[in-house]
Amino acid sequence: MTSQIAVEALTKSEAEKELARLAQVLTRANVEYHTADDPQLDDATYDALKRRNAEIEARFPELKRTDSPSEQIGAALAEGFSKVTHAVPMLSLANAFDPDDVMEFDGRIRKYLGLPADAPLTFTAEPKIDGLSLSLRYEKGRLIHAATRGDGAVGENVTANALTIGDIPQQIANAPDLLEVRGEVYMSHADFEALNARQETAGAKSFANPRNAAAGSLRQLDANVTKSRPLKFFAYAWGALSAPLSDTQMGAIERLEDFGFSINPLTALCNGPSALLAQYSLIESQRATLGYDIDGVVYKVNDLALQQRLGFRSTTPRWAIAHKFAAELAWTWLQGIDIQVGRTGALSPVARLQPVTVGGVVVSNATLHNEDYIKGLDSKGAEIRGGKDIRIGDWVQVYRAGDVIPKIADVDLDKRPPEAVPYVFPQICPECGSAAVREPGDAVRRCIGGLICPAQAVEKLKHFVSRAAFDIEGLGAKQVEQFYADGWIKEPADIFTLKERYGTGLQQLKNREGWGEKSANNLFQAIEEKRKISLDRLIFGLGIRHVGEAASNLIALHYGSWTAFEAAMLEASTGQGPAWDDLIGVDGVGSVMAGSLVNTFAQERERASIDRLIAQLDVQQVKRADTSGSPVAGKTVVFTGTLEKMTRAEAKARAERLGAKVSGSVSAKTDILVAGPGAGSKAKKAAELGIETLDEEGWLSLISDV
Ligand code: IVH
């Protein structure tokens, strides 16, 4: 049977069969877990099957199925949400695209209300946030539920997830008995970039833009996933109310702010259409630096009595309109292609463009991702841009989507110069001349030079001093580049001998351009302070491919000390045996990350460099939280049914703080089942297995003393 064969040994046809089998087994398991609430597979088996599926897909990317289980999370989870019927439907807005449309909007309203052209008519103008709308129902000041827009009439109940968003209060004071607050959930550019970097490190799918990332993050069945994704919320409207908030739109928004909601700071009052257009220009001019995506400006009649009179068409209000920004697209010449070499040796092609303004920002570079992308192929070998390749000299269309990094959307073949030739991607590293190779299943070509490659060495050093790693004050990317160029710092260990070498003598730091006695001493002191470093920061700082911040933390917790960690990495170098099994057993460590870790330690040059660093450091052991005295430490707990005193997310977090492992399914390994009202098959199964079952009260009194 194919399932017994190691992934590395599978032939292509065996792999294809195995992927089909795994798709079937995992889909069934998802239905049993999410829909039927009756899982038949234990967590470890399920995870192992999923990992095997991912490993086969990584080896044979071309065999990845359209119904691949690695892509299924969203869909399967969506079925898990209960439905909420909106007390007041969630409508959309009509659009305006140019100043004439805005004039007509004002004219239509005046006509409808019988207002003369010179009568004052005030509007609010505020950014149209490019996220997804959410309705929050508060009863007597308490959040009752949070629901997505859905089809406008019925949405999905995402209360547990909404509660993980810092901008959404669980409790509000002095509010009407019934208050539905509406607004937009979104993700900032910075958080989006960081999330995608984490997704990439974990081998998970990255998101196309912040809007998709926000939607994907909010619609997770496991609120803990949502919690780990930094979402934000702007309130801008309301649904059902037991008492009016104000008699104006602006007054109502200010009330929402008083209740503790974030409202957009660019919301302004405007007298008439010219003032609206001025606010539009102002908001558009700030668009590029806001740090989050907006796609237009929303105008609303300020007087709520007039809004009431104007009312609605079938799906849009008469009293509001969305003035959309023009698409952020522009055409320009591709003047060259540069290759940048990153920390892990990845060769990234960058388009050098004749500078052009795209949506208010001057763009002169765009990412070209990798060599297949330049050829007109995606990561699965399918055509993009209709299969058109990109050549130096081409007339290209640039766009800024949600991402901050501009991309190339299209190539105009009619304008291609006759002398333009297909781009030849370098097979050697432009920085060090080492071979640049592509491993099967990897779209990226990488320099194999390791530390002898100056680009990799500098990028590694920058990573080493970065905020989440050693975070040395006064030693940033710029200083690292200068010190590297002059040969003062070639590897992390050199940072800690800098004072010894350049604190006294002929050549001194304080005499360097841009430095003085004080700044030099400050730097030496900042470096001294970081000799004492926690194991997790050290592991992250090494900049090992695939090993991100979260994984470094878990690895550090698992091994406790540098000595234990290093010994284990050396022992696991064969890719099998107890040390290897132990490593891939660490939460969040898959075989790809494990392979990367042991490889680093197996390379002599790398290891010698790490040893030199360790000799300079005082590595702090990482302590586990003290859970002694906790009655549930080490126990596996399952929550089911409705919890009344706390949310699932809260219950889980609290149990974990007390040293318990919280699982989603009941198995022979379960120690305690906490069952609230409505508990179904899990309670039955626990009873059959003779597992201790508590109600919420019982659980709370069990853990109340700690
Ligand atoms: S007001 C009755 N204000 O745009 C109209 N909507 O196309 C209530 N949106 O579904 C919506 N920013 O998701 C309003 N400042 C803003 C908005 C905004 C974004 C979204 C919202 C709505 C869509 C309408």
Image (tube, rainbow, N blue to C red):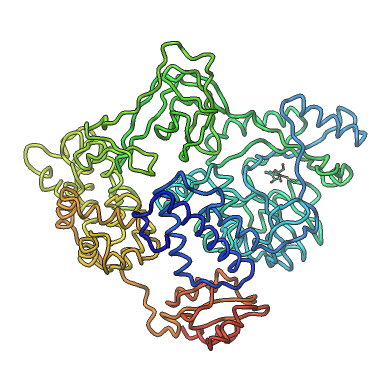
- Quarter of the rendered structure image containing ligand 1: top right
Q: Position of residue 143 (x, y in %)?
A: 68, 65
- Residue 80's place in the image compared with 384, above or below, is below
Q: Nearer the viewer, residue 144 or 527?
A: 144
Residue 521 appears at what percent x and percent y?
A: 19, 47
Measuring 39% from the left and 44% from the top, which residue is drawn there? 441
Q: Is residue 438 left or right of residue 435?
A: right
Q: Is residue 198 left or right of residue 701?
A: left
Q: Is residue 667 above or below residue 317?
A: below
x, y percentage for residue 328? 58, 29
Residue that extends furthest to the left in the rendered view of this protein: 505
Count of marks, rendered view: 0
Q: Position of residue 585 (x, y in %)?
A: 36, 67
Q: Nearer the viewer, residue 628 or 669?
A: 669
Q: Quadrant of the N terminus?
A: bottom left
Q: Is residue 332 above or below residue 525?
A: above
- The residue lying furthest to the top in this view is 418
Choose between 633 and 628: the one closer to the eye. Answer: 633
* Rendered residue at 37%/59% (across/down): 590
